[in-house]
Amino acid sequence: MEISWEKIEKVFRLFFPEFSNKVTWVVVIAGIGLTSTSIVQSIINAILEKQFNLQILGAYDSFVGVVLIAFGLTHNILLQREKTKIEVNGKTEINQKAIEHDKSLFEKLDAILDDEYLMNFFDGVEVNHAYFYSNVKPLVDFMYEIEKVKTSFVLESISAALDDLKPITRKLDTFLINNFDAYGPGKPDDHWLCLHPYWNCDRGGRWDDHEGSVKYDKAANEMFQVIDEYKHAYIRYRKSVKTELCI
């Protein structure tokens, strides 16, 4: 039995004008039809004769039907494999760009305020209830930088963690401005800022000022709470960076 593969290829190209999953089904259905009915055979023969002036179906219609089914299934397997490969490669490329972008952004923010400086600043404030004005500048610069529209991480977990940190940075800044005053041994070009020094009996307050002492204790507790909120939000942000970017 001699089969013209050239003719079979023409049939294949007729049913496969472009890579399409729908076309795969057309070919498979046509192949099934060739193995089971003479009506489909007549229709396909008429199409082939009109388009290509050839007729290949007849004695070998069942065989050709099986060949078409094989072509259709093979095409579908190869097509799905290529689509998967393209999708995987595309996602990998996008993820790599996102990682590079977020690494660069984190390094920029970390140059403004790193975790070691931040924790040392908080330790000093919690112990002394005071700080030098110049020491708060990195926190303020960091607050303004993360508020910028362009300061946006691509990776969702880091972006969400930074969004949670933003209101805490503003809350801390507002608290420091409203509750710390210049007092005590400063520097010629710097101020030593203390938590309500005139309510604090160890600074400018009086030992017999009970009302002032109560107010001071309340302000101190609020200070500890705000600092604790900032620490926890910053640690969550830093952990998300560690998890996603490994830095």
Image: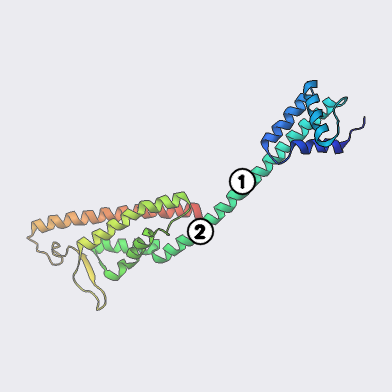
Q: Position of residue 195 (x, y in %)?
A: 20, 62
Determine which residue is flagged by label 1: 87
Q: Residues within 10 Å of mark 2 (few under 14, many from 20)?
A: some
Determine which residue is flagged by label 2: 101
N-term mark: 1 or 2: 1
- At x 24% / y 61%, what residue is drawn? 176
- At x 40% / y 63%, what residue is drawn? 114
Dividing the picture into quadrants, the one containing residue 36 is: top right
Q: Position of residue 99 (x, y in %)?
A: 52, 56
Is 68 situated above or below 210? Answer: above
Quick one: 63 or 218, which is closer to the camera?
63
Q: Residue furthest front?
A: 50
Q: Secondary structure at mark 2?
A: helix
Which quadrant, please, contains the N terminus? Answer: top right
Alpha carbon of mark 1 to alpha carbon of mark 2: how far?
21 Å
Q: Nearer the viewer, mark 1 or mark 2?
A: 1
- At x 16% / y 58%, what residue is drawn? 216
| Left or right: 93, with 37 as reference point | left
Dividing the picture into quadrants, the one containing residue 148 is: bottom left
Is 37 situated above or below 221? Answer: above
- At x 26% / y 55%, what residue is drawn? 224
| Left or right: 29, with 247 as reference point | right
Q: Secondary structure at mark 1?
A: helix
Residue 247 visible to an observer of this rendering: no
Residue 104 visible to an observer of this rendering: yes
Callout 2 amino acid: His
Q: Position of residue 16 (x, y in %)?
A: 74, 38
Q: Residues within 10 Å of mark 1 (few under 14, many from 20)?
A: few
Q: Which mark is residue 31?
A: none
